Image (cartoon, rainbow, N blue to C red):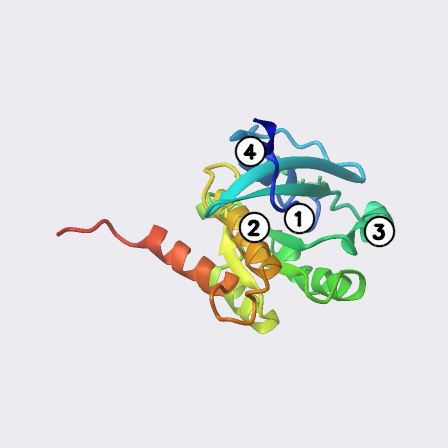
Amino acid sequence: MTSSYRPNLMPNVMLLGDSGVGKTCILMRFRDGLFLCGNFISTVGVDFRTKVVSVDNTKVKLQIWDTAGQERFRSVTHAYYRDAHALLLLYDVTNKTSFDNIRAWLGEIREYAQDDVVIMLLGNKADCGSERAVRREEGERLAREYNVAFMETSAKSGQNVELAFVAVARELKFRQNGQQDCNKFNVQDYVREQTQKSQCPPCTT
Ligand SMILES: Nc1nc2c(ncn2[C@@H]2O[C@H](COP(=O)(O)OP(=O)(O)OP(=O)(O)O)[C@@H](O)[C@H]2O)c(=O)[nH]1
């Protein structure tokens, strides 16, 4: 029956961050499980994809907007902020400038997005160990300062990519159910727990 495929929730999720940080690759990894190595074609304006995720028994159809990081498209992308329910804000851990620019991105978010938008900061390209220019702790500190969730990701290895989208889907589902004030779900705690679990050494008992 078609009704079983009807999503309960269809939030808009936007990908933001400097050009080249990996927004399109994160989306391709999440949606199609693919990574096209070395294939950098800058997004023009805004691109759109959907993917359904299950949160407990709720189907959440994420409507994902992949924006161009290039400055010349800024006025186009600003027009979409207002309709976003969640923002995944990326920097590239091998590119210090992209990290330094996060404060400016957060300023734009404050100016153009809804006050209650869910924001998650992602340090992408975590697979590039030897080229790293931004330490994980720096990302964590910045996220704490702005009171947003944080994790490092890799579109190449898939590290934390699914988790990032599922975490915002969970947060949005709980908010829609009016449970945001009940301490039942907190996206920052959830992300911290889940990333700690994945970093734990294997159990020996
Ligand atoms: N090693 C590594 N490379 C990545 C990763 N994510 C993206 N890249 C590479 O980074 C480059 C840019 O990726 P895109 O996803 O096109 O970047 P973007 O943020 O969408 O860029 P704009 O569309 O210009 O805003 C490509 O050459 C990708 O192959 C990652 O997690 N690890």
Say what amino acid the circle numbered 4 marks.
Ser
What residue do we see at 48% from left, 63% from top?
Answer: 185
Question: For residue 107, what is the image quadrant?
Answer: bottom right
Q: Is mark 3 within 8 Å of ligand 1?
A: no
Q: Which residue is mark 4?
A: 4
Question: For residue 174, what is the image quadrant?
Answer: bottom right
Q: Which residue is mark 2?
A: 169
Mark 1 or mark 2: whose residue is earlier in sequence: 1
Task: From the top left corner, tell me how far across and down residue 96 is, in percent.
Answer: 61, 56
- In this view of the protein, which residue sits in the foreground, 194 or 155? 194
2 vs 4, front mark:
4
What residue do we see at 67% from left, 35% from top?
Answer: 49
Mark 2 or mark 3: whose residue is earlier in sequence: 3
Asked whether disc 4 touches disc 1, contact meaning CB atoms under 8 Å apart, the reply is no
4 vs 1, front mark:
4
Say what amino acid the circle numbered 2 marks.
Ala
Q: CA distance from mark 4 to mark 1?
A: 18 Å
Task: From the top left corner, tell me how far across and down residue 66 is, in percent.
Answer: 70, 41
Q: Which residue is mark 3?
A: 79
- In the rendered view, does 198 fall on the left or right side of 18? left
Quadrant of the snapshot with the N terminus: top right
2 vs 3, front mark:
2
Q: CA distance from mark 1 to mark 2?
A: 8 Å
- In the rendered view, does 129 fall on the left or right side of 121? left
Mark 2 or mark 4: whose residue is earlier in sequence: 4
Q: In the image, which disc is placed on residue 11?
A: 1
Using the image, determine if residue 131 lies above or below residue 41: below
